[in-house]
Structure formats: C-alpha cells, structure tokens
Amino acid sequence: MTTLQLLVNGLALGAAYALVALGFVLVLNATSAVNFAQGDLVTAGGLLAVALAPLIPLPGIALLPVVLVIMAALGLLLALAAYLPLRRSPPVAVFISTIAVGIILQNGASVLFGPEPRAAPPLLSGGTVDLGGLVVAEQSLAIIAVAGLLIAGQQWLFARTQVGRRLRATAQDPEMARACGVPVTAMILVTFALGTAYAGAAGLLLANRYFVTPTAGGDLILKAYIAVTIGGWGSVPGAVVGALLIALFEVGVSSVLSYPVALGLLYAALLVILLARPQGLFGEAARRRA
C-alpha cells in the first residue's frame, strides 16, 4: 500500500473519529459533563444500519438520514433519562449515569445481534476509484465526503442560525444565557440530539470497512477522549484536528509495525502532550473542565 493510499485511509478513519469527538465535545461544552456513553452510541448507530439494511435494501448513503433521525431521538432520551434529572447533582452522578447507559446499550446489542462482527452496507458501491494511477477505496472517499459535509453543516448551524447562536450561548455561559431568555434546557436537549446523531453517523461510516461489535464502544470513547485532550477541552476545531491526528498516527504506525504497538505509542504520545501542553493544541490554559 502506497503512502497516498495510507493517507486516504487515515483521513477516512479520522473523519469518522472526528464525528465521534465532535458529538462528545458539544455535550461537554453545553453541560460540563462527560458523556461516557458516546462510544456505545457509535456502536448503536452502526448496528442500527446493520438492522435497517434488510428492510431498506439501499446503499448506506440512503440509510444515513434514517440513522441520524433515530439516533437524534435516542439522544433526547439519553438527556431526559441520564442528564437532566441529575444536572444539579455532583458531576460524578452524571458520569455514572452515562456509563450505565453505555453498559445497557452494550448488553442490549449483545442480546439482539450476538458478539460477531457485523458489516453495514457501503455508502455507495464499495468499489475502487482510480485517481490518476492511485487506486483508493470508494468507501474511504465517501466517508471523508460525508463526514466533511456533516461537520460543515454543524459549523453553518452554529455560525448562521438563531438556534446555533443559542447553542453557543448555552455552551459559553448557561446562567447568563438563561437570564437573556435562551431556553437552556431545550438547547441542552438539542445538543444531546446532535451529539448522538453524529455518533450514529460515525457508526454507519465505520461499520462497513471496519465492522462493528457490541463491545467496540469502549475503544471509541477512549479515542474521542484522547482527541479532545489533544485538541483542547472545549475546542470544536481541536476535537476534529485531534481525531485526524490520532487516525493518521494509528494507520501509519500500524502499517509499519502493528496495531497494538500503534495503540501503545498513541498513549505514550498522549502523555508527552499532556506534559508539554496540558491544555491541548487549541485549549485554554487557565480554564478547568469536569
């Protein structure tokens, strides 16, 4: 495999990771709480695509809107059940509640789908594309394109719409936003819906080339956590950049050595970054997050 092919594969994996990290940091900004169920929500999105495939025998791109809507509804339920009743409790209560939700999702998926790896339909045809002599998987290019459109859509929503401005106000200062008439609780619900929809989209994107199992969520939440740490807590661009760096590092080292070595070196690199720049690449040095 050539360097350019590895780069495309790394960007595709990083684009999916970026959606996971983006949903993670949106909820973090709006609530100052960590959603430890985010990785299992990615798995849920992938398995949802697997379940929908026999019912809607179309390419994955046609399943994507259905997955987004269903996962957004699941995000609303998550907020109503695991965050809003506990938001005035100590932060550890929310941590535990989201961990519990993740365990419920894992066990439910194991019962419904079994432990075997499953594959969702490809976004388009699953073939290859010849780019001037460089043969790359069509699925990789489609993942990059779809994730890029979703991330651009999120940026447009936040920058150009009234809902986006209210979401940003809620993330920056919920009490001041409430005093200015922003419906903070409604904005938190929207944030959970968006974050969970992004997780579901990532699950669909990953579930064809990389497969999906009920227990894959633990690894994915760690990747999201590392991406946010590298990029800087609270930074949306940082989460995206951190996710891309993780994937490129993972694919590059795995191609030369092995995946376990790549994972070990990734955690070693994380420790170095924390020692050298604990606030991350785009983070705020003086601000603390839960």
Image (cartoon, rainbow, N blue to C red):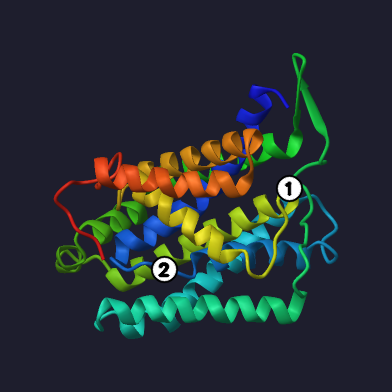
Q: Is residue 150 something that shows in the picture?
A: yes
Indicate the quadrant where residue 248 lies. top right
Residue 124 located left or right of residue 104: right
Mark 2 falls on what kind of element? loop
User: Nearest the camera: 55 or 180?
Assistant: 55
Q: Does 142 appear above or below 42?
A: above
Coordinates of residue 280 in the picture (x, y in percent):
29, 44
Residue 90 lies, in percent from the top left, at 25, 81
Residue at image coords 19%, 68%: 178
Which amino acid, by three-letter code, is at mark 1? Answer: Arg
The residue indicated by pointer 1 is 209
* Quadrant of the image containing the C terminus: bottom left
Residue 237 is left or right of residue 55, and the answer is left
Which residue in the structure is indicated by mark 2? 35
Q: Residue at x 67, y 61 (%)?
A: 46
Q: Is residue 44 above or below residue 253?
A: below
Does residue 132 appear left or right of residue 240 in this picture? right
